[in-house]
Structure formats: C-alpha cells, structure tokens
Image (cartoon, rainbow, N blue to C red):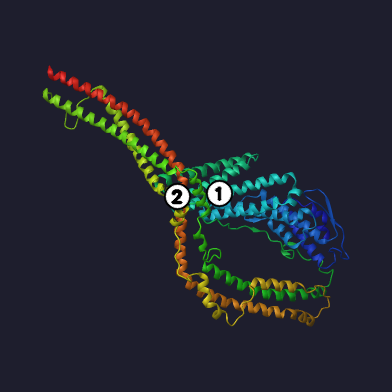
Amino acid sequence: SFSSLSFQSAVNVPRDFEGCSTLRKYFGQLHYLQSRIPMGAEQEAAVPIAWTEIFSGKTVTHEDIKYEQACILYNLGALHSMLGAMDKRVSEECAAGAFTYLRDHFPHSYSVDMSHQILNLNINLMLGQAQECLLEKSMLDNRKSFLVARISAQVVDYYKEACRALENTETASLLGKIQKDWKKLVQMKIYYFAAVAHLHMGKQAEEQQKFGERVIYFQSALDKLNEAIKLAKGQPETVQEALRFTMDVIGGKYNSAKKDNDFIYHEAVPALDTLQSVKGAPLVKALPVNPTDPAVTGPDIFAKLVPMAAHEASSLYSEEKAKLLRDVMAKIEAKNEVLDQFMDSMQLDPDTVDNLDMYNHIPPILMEKCAALSVRPDTVKNLVQSMQVLSGVFTDVEASLKEIRDLLEEDEAEERKLQELLGKVPPPQGSPPVPSPVLAEVSKECSKYMEVHEKASFTNTELHKAMNLHISNLRLLSGPLEQVRAALPAPTLTEGASWEAALLPSRSASLSGAPLVLSSGSAAQRFLEVFSSLSDSMTLLSRQKLFEEQLKKYDQIKVYLEQNLAAQENVLKALTDANVKYAAVRKALAEVEHKWNTTVQTLVASYEAYEDLMKKSQEGKDFYTDLEGKAAKLLEKARAACQAAEANRQQILEK
C-alpha cells in the first residue's frame, strides 16, 4: 500500500543505501500518482505540501505535487553525497544525478535552496569530488602523465563552475558566513589541482625530452601550489600535511629541472601562455534518475485507480509528437555527427585560419620585455663587463698557479743537479728529490688550488656559453622595436594564397542544386519553437485523424529541414576541395608559426635569464677573487722558499 511509502517514511529515511532506495521508490510512485490525479499547481486535487529550507530554516508550502517530488530529489542527492563522503575513494559514480534531474525538470521558484545557482553549485561539487576519486585512482595505477593531467584539469573545471555559483549574489546572501568559507576552500582546491595538472604536464614534457617546457610547467605548478597554501590557512592538519608533501615533490622537481636546463640542456623556457592549455577529461558519471524504472520504483501501485485505456488515450497525442520529434532530431544528430567528424579531421581552428595579422605586431609578452629593458639601458653593457671581469680574474688565478708550478719544477731540477754533482745516488727514475718542508707544503697547497680551479673551470665555461647565447638577444630587445619586429619570422604568400581564395572558386559550382539555408542547429531550434506552440490541452477523446491534421502544420518546416540537411553534403565537398588547395599554404604557415613561437620564446628566455646570469657571474667573481688572493699569497711563499733553497745550494757548492 501507499502507506509503506508515506511522507513520514520519506522524511525519516535511514542514512544508508536502504534510505536511497526508499526515496527513489517514493519519488517514482509520486510520478505515477500525478499522472492520474490532477494534483499540480491550481488543479482540482492539489493539497498543501510543506518542507523546511535547509539554509534559512523557514517552512515553505506549495499546493503542487511536483514540489513534493522536488524535495525528495533534493534529499536523495544530499543522502548520496553523505554516503559518498563515507565511502572509499574508488568510485567514479556521484550524487550529481539527482540534483541535475531536479535542475532540468522542475521549477526553480519553489524555494531558494532549489535555485538554479544552488543546484549548479551542488552538481559541480559532487562531480568535482567524484573526479578527485578518479584522479587518485589514476595516480595509484600509474596512468600516463598526460591522462592524469587532463583528469586533474577537469577537477579544476568543475570547481571553477562551483566557484562561479558561489560568487552569485543570491547564493552569497542565502549561505551567509559559510559562503566565504566554502569559496575559500573551493579556490584552494582549484589552485591545488591546477598544480597537480601542471606537475604531470611537466612529467610528460620530461618524457618527451622537452626540457624548456618541463621547467615552465614545474614552475607554474609551484606558483599555483603556493597560492593553495595561502588559502589553506585554518584547514585541518591532514590538509596541511598533504600540501607539505606536494610541495616537497613539486619543489624538488622544479629545482632539479631548472638546474639541468641551466647547465646541461640550455633550452629556451617558453612562456606558459604560449603552450597549449590542458583540456579536462570528464570521466565521472552522475547516478541516473528514472522515475518509471520498475526495478527501482517497484510496480505501479496506482495502476487500478484510473483505467489504463484512458491513460493511454491521454498520452497518445504526446507520443505522436514525440515520434515526429525523435525522427527529426535523429536526422539532425546524424548530420551533426558527420559534420563534427569532418571538421575534426580537417583540424581547422576558425580563430587561426589565415590569421596573418599576428605577424604585423610584436606579441604583448615581448613588448613587455622590450619596455622593461628600455628603462635599463646598461643591461648588455653590465653583462659584458661582468664577463670581462670574471675572465680577467680567472686568467690571473690560472697565471699565478702556473707560475707556482713552474717555480716548483725549476727548484726540483736544480736540486737534482746538486745531488748529481755531490756524487750522491740519484733517486729512482720518475721520483723527485725530497723537497724542503716549506716547498712540500707549497706543493700540496698548489695541488689543492689546481683541483678547485679545474672543477670551477667547467662551470665557468658553461656560464660563458650561456652568456654568449643570450647577449645577442638582449641587444636585440634593447634596440628599436623595428629591429625586433624584423627579427621575427613572417610568411611570404603569393597573391590569393589563402583559405578564402581556395574556397571561393568552388562555391557556386559545388552548392548549385541545393539551397544553402540555416545550419542544422538553427533549423532544429526553430522546429522545436514552432512545435511547442501547439496547445497540449487536447481532450482524452482525440482521434487519430485530428492528430494527423495537427501534425501537418509542420510539413513545411520538415521540408525546410530536409533542404538544410541535404545541402550539407555539397558544403562538405566544397570544403574538401578548398582544403586540398589550401594544403601547401597551410604547411608553410604552420612552419612560420612554429619559427615565430620559437623565436619569441627564445627572446623571452634570454630576458628572464639575465638576472640569473648576473647572479652566477657575481658568484664566480667572488669565488675567483678569493682564490686569486690565496694563489697570490702562495706565489709569494713559493718564491721565498725557492730563493732560500737556491741560497742553500750555493753555500753547499762553495764549501
């Protein structure tokens, strides 16, 4: 009986999956009931139905059975979300289905907690958390880096939609203080999962040996994670611990990638906005809601309340309309699918086809660097002077160490001669005479300084290579803008070599025979508008003949649609012919665009490398200045020791 699914049972459901089942059954039976008894707004059998709003605590009453259904759906979504929070993070199904069905099939004016913005907030929060579960599983399964990045980017997309709903003034007013807390938490998650997405894009760049891209992705991940940490103040310790762990991972990746690129690969680090954005991959699914599924709602307990023949008669006309609409929409969808596949196969972006205007201007990011250098005119001069000073100190150190080594070798040779004159047995071949303690100490110190110098010499050479690589670019950026513009690649196309030129000659011939009318989408919209204008207030005694007469109103629109759909084949043929003619131009433009982007990235990288080069140059100067002082002192000590040894040898010879 209906009492087993009474209002009280639906309100006081247990917080488990049995409660979800109860709500679904009750919702389905309400659907059966309202199809037989006029209980809608302002209908004969309507009764007052009262529920309490979740946020305001106010009691809201409507005389409409759909309000009861809407509240049950809301509670079904809420209960699913509670159970999802307690479940293991391994399922991609989520509670968004109930909220989505509520948003798409019921009025939003029943109560403020069923407004479009609140439902959008709930839907995207549910989808975002479900996508989080899938992301975690993908990382545990060691899926490919690019796939993990796309899954994480979709988490960001869901939370951005939720954030937009939270920023709505109506939503903020309804939620009160918790709106700020929720918004802060959602924004923290946006930055965190954006960092995870760019971390894995960096790992993909590493796999592809694109070391410049690797650096910028890891740097972006680090920046976004820092923003997440700022927003995470006041969050539980588990969140703080997760952020610290992620910082260790991303920080380590970035430092390692930057060091490798600075000293080994020397690849230009592109600007992040010049790289292709990461498109999200929505892989979660909302639990569907079907009020007429007997497996969920059970048998129709109101089946005998109204004769089925009368019920069938009332829905016959609706079915005829639905049949006509399904037929038309099936044709439109089939054509749209063909069109989508065709456009994907051509790989044409309407925003970039024949976009030659970009080559007439210096990109904003490059203009920004030129402007920055214009107020620092000594940039190149300072870098050159720094190189010269470093080279000078380096040379002085090398000269001092060489002189010390020469003095030691000369003293060793003189000592060997003295031993031979005195008739003493010479040391074994290759073994030097035993020097004085002072000279032995000098020799030991010299060897230590030589070893340090040789190790630093490699770093110094790499630094000079990096400087030479960037100085010419910095000179260019510091000069007139005309020179910068001239240094950027530009296409050289013959007259008429464009997409428009390729398409124009074939238009009249290809499209003759079928009128080029509105697109399928526009015609379908018009069809739906006219179709919905027919009154649905037909009596239960409507006859098939009347149905047919009413449906004839749409014959002209069907003809209009058929013409539109037939024209698509001719349009596709014209586009194919034009694309063939455009292929050579397209290839040339792609090559020029690649060179353009590479040049811009290289120039930007040179500007960004300046501060780092100056810092490393100063560190080199400080290191060699210190080593020069030590080498100079050691040289004086070596000279004095060698002079003393020579004087000692002379005294021995005189005796």
Residue under the image location 58 percent in, 58 percent down = 281
Q: Amino acid at mark 2?
A: Gly
Picture quadrant of residue 644:
top left
Taking the image as shown, residue 405 lies to the left or right of residue 260, namely left
Relative image position of residue 194 (x, y in whole percent): 57, 50
Dot 2 crowding, Cα within 10 Å, few <14, some 14–19, many 20+:
some
Q: Nearer the viewer, mark 2 or mark 1?
A: 2
Residue 81 seen anywhere in this rendered image of the structure: yes
Between 235 and 81, which is closer to the camera in this rendering? 235
Extreme residue toward the top, this view: 655
Residue 90 seen anywhere in this rendered image of the structure: no
Secondary-structure class at tag 1: helix
**Which mark is on residue 350?**
none
Viewport quadrant of the C terminus:
top left
CA distance for labels 2 and 1: 40 Å
**Which residue is identified by label 2?**
479
Relative image position of residue 647 (x, y in whole percent): 19, 20
Against 281, residue 444 (above or below) is: above
Against 627, residue 274 (above or below) is: below
**Which residue is identified by label 1?**
196
Viewport quadrant of the N terminus:
bottom right
Taking the image as shown, residue 552 lies to the left or right of residue 408, namely right
Relative image position of residue 404 (x, y in whole percent): 26, 30
Against 457, residue 369 (above or below) is: below
Mark sitting earlier along the chain (2/1)? 1
Secondary-structure class at tag 2: loop
Residue under the image location 59 percent in, 83 percent down = 513
Taking the image as shown, residue 106 lies to the left or right of residue 640, namely right
Residue under the image location 44 percent in, 62 percent down = 591
